Amino acid sequence: MIKCDLHTHTLKSRCGYCSPLEMMNQAADLGLDALAITDHGTYTGGYISHALFRLPDMYRGVRVLKGVEVTICEDAQKIGLPAKYLHNFDLVISGFHNALPESDNPKKNNEYLIRYLDAHPYIDIISHPGSNGFPLDMSSVIPELIPRGVAFELNNAKLAQGKADLEQLRVMVEMVVTHQGRLVLNSDAHTVFEVGQDDAIRAFLDTLTPVPESCIVNRNLESVVAFIEERKPAKFVHKCNKGI
Ligand SMILES: [Zn+2]
Ligand SMILES: [Zn+2]
């Protein structure tokens, strides 16, 4: 069980099937310490409104974090996120979702990812790197991105659905550990039934040399809060260039 689940979707993502309150109640019933609601930005059919930030910070013992998952575009300057909300987010997650020119080309995807993070330095977590259809050259891109402070996700939903390249993930984890980067373990839940689920991540990690706990951003609530605080200045200093 992931005690601090930092990547979940609600009805505010077109692909989510449950309300924010249903997800929060499930997190409370499961005894989670934190739940981040990270609906999709506008380029992937999500709808972010100011009401997200009117949800309580604590609900039935669960720290409720407000986030967003934006998609990596061909035009690195574009981000499907209302600029006026940027400084309100606890977490900004970003990953590949929509096909890009040559998105089956690892070198191109590396370039997109680096350009995107350079244009949007407030992105905290790369969601589901190594997912099928968007290969990366992990051995070169991970060491390049670690100094930017971003964390790399192991995504339970992608692993459970067989939509992740295990060899790429193996290299990613090895690079993160070697270069003292950070991992984050998330469910990417789209229904209440997936909240906090990490079975597929655990099964994958069991095939590797044990990963030091200190590499994992969401190992406990204190480490999550420390990560959010560390990343906060970027959200105040930088602006979305083309908000929506
Ligand atoms: Zn995603
Ligand atoms: Zn997601």
Image (cartoon, helix red, strand yellow):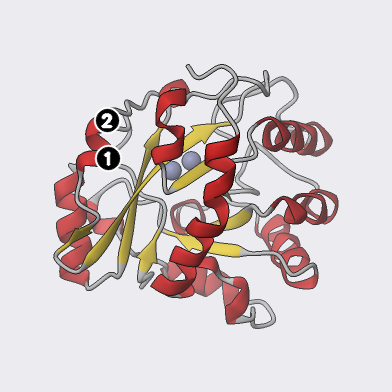
Q: The residue under label 1 is which amino acid type?
A: Phe
The N terminus lies in which quarter of the figure? Answer: bottom left
> In the picture shown, does residue 146 fall above or below 18?
below
Residue 153, image x and y in percent?
56, 56
Any mark on residue 233, and which? none
Q: Which residue is mark 1?
A: 53
Q: Residue at x 19, y 69 (%)?
A: 61
Contact, CB < 8 Å: mark 1 with mark 2?
Answer: yes
The three-letter amino acid code for the residue at tag 2 is His
Q: Is residue 14 rendered to the left or right of residue 118?
A: left
Q: Say few, some or many: other residues with alpha carbon within 10 Å of mark 2 (under 14 / 14 to 19 / 20 or more).
A: few
> Which quadrant of the structure image shows residue 38?
top left
* Vertical position of residue 44 compared to residue 5: above or below: above
The residue where tag 2 is placed is 50
Q: Is residue 162 visible?
A: yes
Q: Where residue 172 sits in the image (x, y, percent)?
A: 72, 60
Quadrant for ligand 2 reads top left
Residue closest to the eye, 34 or 85: 85
Q: Nearer the viewer, residue 10 or 239?
A: 239
Residue 43's place in the image compared with 23, above or below, is: above
Horizontal arrangement in the rendering, residue 48 relative to residue 170 (left or right): left
Say left or right for 78 vs 90. right
For the point 78% across and 52% down, the residue is 138
Point out residue 144 in the picture as x, y percentages from the top left corner.
82, 50
